[in-house]
Image: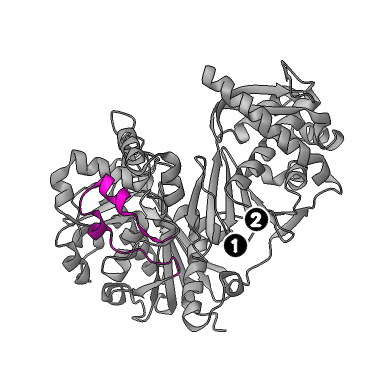
Amino acid sequence: MDSAAYYLGFDFSTQQLKVIAVNEQLLVVYEDNVHFDKDLPEFGTQGGVHVRGDKLTVTSPVLMWLKALDRILDRMKSSEFNFSKVKALSGTGQQHGSVYWKTGSREVLNHLPAEHPLHIALQTCFSISDSPIWMDSSTSAECQHLEKSIGGAQVLADITGSRAYERFTGNQIAKIYKQNPKEYSQCERISLVSSFAASLFIGDYAAIDYSDGSGMNLLDIKEKTWNETCLNACAPGLKEKLGSPVPSSSILGTVSSYYVQRYGFSPHCSVVAFTGDNPASLAGMRLEESDIAVSLGTSDTLFLWIKDPTPTLEGHIFINPVQSQDYMALLCFKNGSLMREKIRDKCSSASWEEFSNVLRSTPPGNNGHIGFYFDVMEITPQAVGIHRFNGENQKVPEFPKDVEIRALIEGQFMAKRIYAERLGYKILPQTRILATGGASCNQDILQVLSDIFNAPVHTIATANSACLGCAYRAAHGLASLSSSSTFAEVLKAPQHQLVVTPRPGADKVYQPLLERYAECEIAVIQATKIL
């Protein structure tokens, strides 16, 4: 294979624009980033965003994203990166954000003048200059209206994969239509951040991909088409402004002549559909069918590969970015590492070593003791406070320190398994758990994870997983033109590192405990409601 061929991945994230190039062996040969606050201070962002006076409205300037792309491509050129060897590129954008193209902009995109940077050539093309992004939570009224229009939160989740969320794009569009009807009517196309970025590369409006489109509260995830009731509840004429969605591994076309003339790209360089950051991470972590990825960070996040989803009011179901007949699910648990550190400080003299010793010396199942540890209001489930139950499901005020440590870790992982299974996830003999994030370097914590899921745990390096995932997706998109190879077959990348396997008999210990955990959880949710 010609290792001189490259694949590019771009990541338009909240705080920076990243680029990664990989060769035919999928090894990283180039990477760079433009940090919005530091490198583009003229936009006056903090953390890449503007937070308005109401503290709910959060936006990012569209021209900042354009200028960042100009900057990163210019840097690549001055470092003599050989653009002519790039066979395909793809990318990702922070999910849910939206960009509003003014009528007439398509014409400008089609004829970009190679002598001008993008932020000059396209500066008059947007009817809304500050894009609402995922951190925005100003659309509660629109969410209520959407759920009411469709017949309730669960009906909306059944159709679109999620109940109404303030950050989801449909609700953001509804707010813009309500508050800025003139700007809405002047807009001929609405892009997600991902499809906006892809549009820049093909010099035309790029389709929204199925996977990122699943984060809008508008796409019917089974039919893979926009749901008319949802569209009509949000704004008039929306279907035309969105265009038709496409599978996430679609080739949208080749790079526009602008990139050939200005940077020396090959005119044959393919552009694979851009997607959202969470779907791109699934690709970057190289999940396969029946795998589960657990990111153990400030909040804990679960990525699941699912065949037959059963959407609930917790979590999100998206169409799978690398195999569009399948699905992926996302579950977020707010009380992650900060809660673990708090119990470590209180019960093991602030020492991880002592914490680990306790996990090793206490029995799996904790002699029937179960704990719920929610320092801040949890979202999965909606509950707060610390709740402890003895072996008879009776509430108790406190546990001995060693019991407390195991109850915390077992409780966090039992919740993850229960909520994963409610979304339709099934643990199969070939299931692997891929662990990442801060706590994934603690083998004793991972042993509890392995025991509760009754599956082996591997660790993965996920620095820049979304960006890397898009370089991989570019390679896969191009390969699938000439063969029906799956994503995993194309990606003969280095194997994940096996760390622990479940202890014999763990399943027999945890099956009854999982049932009891679910029963106790009802009492915990009730206690929160009384508060």
Question: Counting other residues with Cα less than 10 Å from the Cα at mark 2, is it few (<14), some (14-19), or many (20 or more)?
Answer: many
Residue 368, above or below 108 = above
Q: Where is residue 528 in the image (x, y as percent from the top left)?
A: 55, 22
Relative to 414, residue 105 above or below: below
Q: Which mark is residue 110?
A: none
> Could you tell me which secondary element the residue under label 1 belongs to?
loop
Query: Measuring 49% from the left and 84% from the top, which residue is drawn there?
Result: 482
Which element type, helix, strand or loop, lies under badge 2?
loop
User: Can residue 295 be seen at all in this image of the molecule?
Assistant: no
Disc 2 residue type (three-letter): Ile
Q: In which quarter of the image is residue 251?
A: bottom left
Left or right: residue 88 versus residue 240 is right
Q: Quadrant of the N terminus?
A: bottom right
**Mark drawn on residue 286:** 1
Magenta stretch: includes residue 239: yes
Q: Is residue 302 magenta?
A: no
Q: Find the magenta span and give its range.
A: 223-249
| Residue 460 numbered mark, or none | 2
Residue type highlighted by circle 1: Arg
| Residue placed most toward the observer, 313 or 212 | 313
- Tell me where residue 382 appears, x and y as whole percent: 53, 30
Up-down: is 286 above or below 26? Answer: above
Q: In this view, does 393 lie to the left or right of 72?
A: right
- Left or right: 233, with 350 as reference point: left
